[in-house]
Image (cartoon, grey):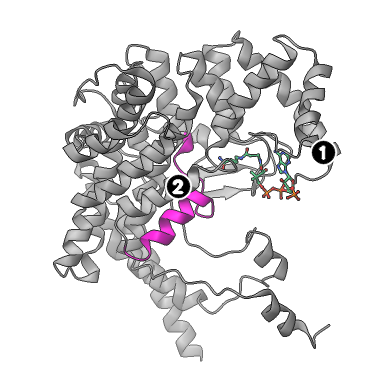
Amino acid sequence: MASTTRSVLKASRAAQFARAKSFSSSAVKNTSLKERLAQLIPAEIENVKAIRAAHGKKSFGPVLVDQLYGGMRGLPALIWDGSVLDAEEGIRFRGKTIPECQNLLPKAPGGQEPLPESLFWLLVTGEVPTQEQVTELSKDWAARAALPDFVEEILDRCPPTLHPMSQFSLAVTALNHNSAFAKAYQDGISKKEYWGPTFEDCMDLIAKLPNIAGRIYQNVFGQRKLPAIDPAKDYSHNLATLLGFGDNAAFVELLRLYITIHSDHEGGNVSAHTGKLVGSALSDPFLAFSASLNGLAGPLHGLANQEVLIWLRKMQSKIGENASDEAVKEYVWSTLKGGQVVPGYGHAVLRKTDPRYTAQREFALKHLPDDPLFKLVGQIYNVVPDILLEAGKAKNPWPNVDAHSGVLLTHYGLHQMQFYTVLFGVSRAFGVAAQLIWDRALGAPLERPKSYSSSAIEKIFKDKQ
Ligand code: FAM
């Protein structure tokens, strides 16, 4: 027993040492993202082996029957390395808070917000990239950005009445046609090599999203001719240009912040978990991420950003602009009494104001302090939490990310709220893709939790009252 424990500890220390060594390698400065990953993977495989050897049989605590019926809240069930969500503090990307990311990650020349390219590098490697590495990533994504003709045709044939999220999901599913992973699997690739074509698919996926989003936007709302991707511009600048806002430097900065803060929110939320689950069947990253998008399209998840703006506009048409606190309170109560949720408030994990809300509020204070809708959002913040507390149901009365994003987009002229969740989807690809790469590198197995029928639960506890 003692010698087994000693050898487990020794293996664990050796793995930690190898991991620390590879994670602080001086080669990092000159490597591409794929080269850096190839350096990190062997040590991480050893690290996971060591964690499982040392802790694999330890319990995380009891599972309550309530958790089976209650959407698995708080049930420890997944490994997700890119980010961790603390109920009080909010999200940390590879250990870094949003303000730390804003401070540390490379920015565009003259810009103040992190480049999402740098956030992706951080999510994948746990390291802050150099400016040169970020520039190379921008160029790589620009070179991969073109859509196959048939995907463009699928989008062009969609009726404009089909919700942009459904169009988005269709297009991403169709990209599976050219999946490097699906092809490699058919050609008999070894398990050990899965991560390579998964990486290529994830890079293609992220790279092609601006052209998909831009095409949906122009087909449904704009009818502008789509400009070509400019390899000299960063990802967000190209996306802004496709939407018709590339000349507005503040909007481009907003998109950089927007993509960064919406990228990842640990693994249990619907879009992240769906992507991981579908990926675990070795469905390629396009199939896995289109499933994520279908989850994000639900009003309790990503679609809430659309719902918030619809709700605000309805409120304005009912009680007018510059309404009193009393009128706002009455409107909020009428929403609750109608059996509806107040969109943009509450969270399954968070118990404080979402730092993603705060980051957007700070952006608004800097760039649009006098915007009337921004002022209304501030007024609602002063009113809603007390009402939700008084109503006595919601565990978290504070605003989430979606309470703020639409107000910023509409300030710059992106008024079409049905499009907002598409931008959330572009961002969420970053977090899901980073985890899909690691899942294939670490040999994550098929997900298959155990389900029970209600009668089985009754039977199990029948004699244990
Ligand atoms: N307005 C009214 N009721 C709310 C509420 C809100 N904003 N938030 C929670 N509740 C209710 C909830 O519907 C539930 O009622 P029932 O017992 O009748 O089913 C009760 O309070 C307990 O819910 P909870 O445990 O506090 O929250 P959940 O973990 O079940 O749900 C949310 C979390 C996010 C689905 C919920 O807070 C909600 O519906 N919020 C509004 C929609 C929204 O903003 N979604 C976006 C979340 C966001 F972060 C994202 O994913 N993008």
Q: Secondary structure at mark 2?
A: helix
Give the residue type that dot 1 points to. Answer: Leu
Q: State the mark number for residue 184.
A: none
Boundaries of the magenta span: 261-282
Q: Residue at x 57, y 48 (%)?
A: 85
Visible in this render: residue 160? yes
Relative horizontal placement of residue 276, taking residue 198 as reference (left or right): right
Relative horizontal placement of residue 363, taking residue 206 as reference (left or right): right
Q: State left or right for residue 346 relative to residue 241.
A: right
Residue nearest the observer in this picture, 452 or 448: 452
Q: Residue 88: x, y in percent?
A: 67, 44
Q: Secondary structure at mark 1?
A: helix
Which disc, if any, is residue 294? 2
Closer to viewer: mark 2 or mark 1:
2
The residue under the point 26% across, 44% down is 203
Q: Which amino acid type corresponds to the residue marked 2 in the rendered image?
A: Asn
Q: Residue furthest bottom?
A: 1
Task: Identify which residue, 242 or 174, lies in the foreground.
Answer: 174
Which residue is labeled 1 in the image?
389
